[in-house]
Image (cartoon, grey):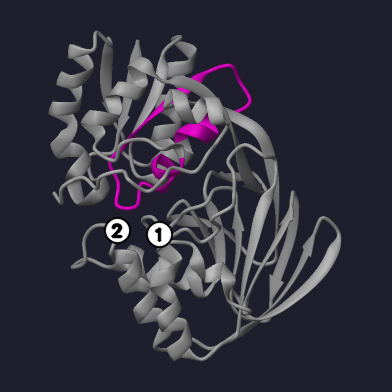
Amino acid sequence: MLSLIVNPASGGGRAGRALGAVRAALGRRGLEHHAELTLDLPHARELAAAAVKAGEMPVAFGGDGLVAAVADAVRSGDTVMGVLPGGRGNDFARCLGLPLDPVAATAVLADGAPLAVDMGAAGDRTFLGIATTGFDSEANRVANSARLIRGRFVYTYGGLRTLATWKPASFKLSVDGVEHALYGYTVAVANAAMHGGGMQLAPEASLTDGQFDVVMIADLRKATFLRMLPTVFKGTHVALDEVTILRGSTIELSADRPFTIYADGDPLAVLPATLRVLPAAVRVMAPARAAGAAGAVPDGTAKEPEAG
């Protein structure tokens, strides 16, 4: 039995509009299920915990924040969870190689295989994707407040708005005990390759290797940064001299002014903070090829769902 945990407001209401078609597809595949609508993320965690107690598979149908909340509720146990993409960015689904059409993604619930993936943690808060601070976290905040821009391009809008007033910051970080410093734009602690609706900020990051990829973007002219932004969707920005990537499992991070860390589209912590990897923390239904390849990044051929 599947417990479909749905945020009907995700993706500007896309998840709610697709719910009927998703339930019909699950029925055609012979997957017994019931649907539960979330009130907020704490409620989603309660619904996931109730599904585990009932011996059901919790399936998160919404955005990355909902997926992370359900994963947090079932982590460190034997429960396998499912994911149906219904948000704006759907970056965790992209990294798993799921179809971005939620109806098509129901096939993975029927024919996929469990994959044990890492999570990240900051104190008692957890995340699945990329935890960013500095320019990227400010852009995420702007994107979350946008009302007229829809879909994944809201993150591009957030970046352009933030760039207009951005001033470089000084960051200090320790990666597995080794000290580093950065003057510039962003420090990103990546458990996965993508954020912001398909931006490959950390193209070599893996969900299954027990390590973070730490992406640091140093100061550069705003015009150069603007030219760099489109290259992040292909991950080619990492060739720039101003981009440094470190790897480690415990990251201590601070800055010369207040910043909030964002992950999975939502606030995670405030600086200073310590982030650590939780290896193989949660089991997720993934396409059989991805489960066999232990977290291979998809080839980018997934078709975007139609705007809702």
Say whether marks 2 and 1 touch (CB < 8 Å).
Answer: yes
Q: Is residue 127 left or right of residue 48?
A: right
Q: Position of residue 197 (x, y in %)?
A: 36, 56
Q: Say which label, 2 or 1, has the lower sequence index.
A: 2
Q: Nearer the viewer, residue 229 or 63?
A: 229
Does residue 91 belong to the magenta stretch? yes
Per the image, the residue denoted by label 1 is 196
Question: Across the whole image, how many numbered discs are drawn on residues?
Answer: 2
Does residue 65 belong to the magenta stretch? no
Q: Secondary structure at mark 2?
A: loop
Q: Magenta segment, which residues?
A: 70-95
Q: Amino acid at mark 2?
A: Arg
Q: Position of residue 177 (x, y in %)?
A: 86, 59
- Residue for point 52% across, 49% down: 129
- Residue for point 18% across, 38% down: 16
113, above or below 167, in the image: above
Residue at mark 2 to residue at mark 1: CA–CA distance: 7 Å
- Residue for point 41% across, 13% down: 56
Q: Nearer the viewer, residue 236 or 14?
A: 236
Per the image, the residue denoted by label 2 is 152
Q: Secondary structure at mark 1?
A: loop
Q: Nearer the viewer, residue 198 or 239?
A: 239
The local crowd at label 1, few if under 14, some if 14 to 19, many if 20 or more residues have their Cα within 10 Å, is many
Q: Position of residue 154 (x, y in %)?
A: 29, 65
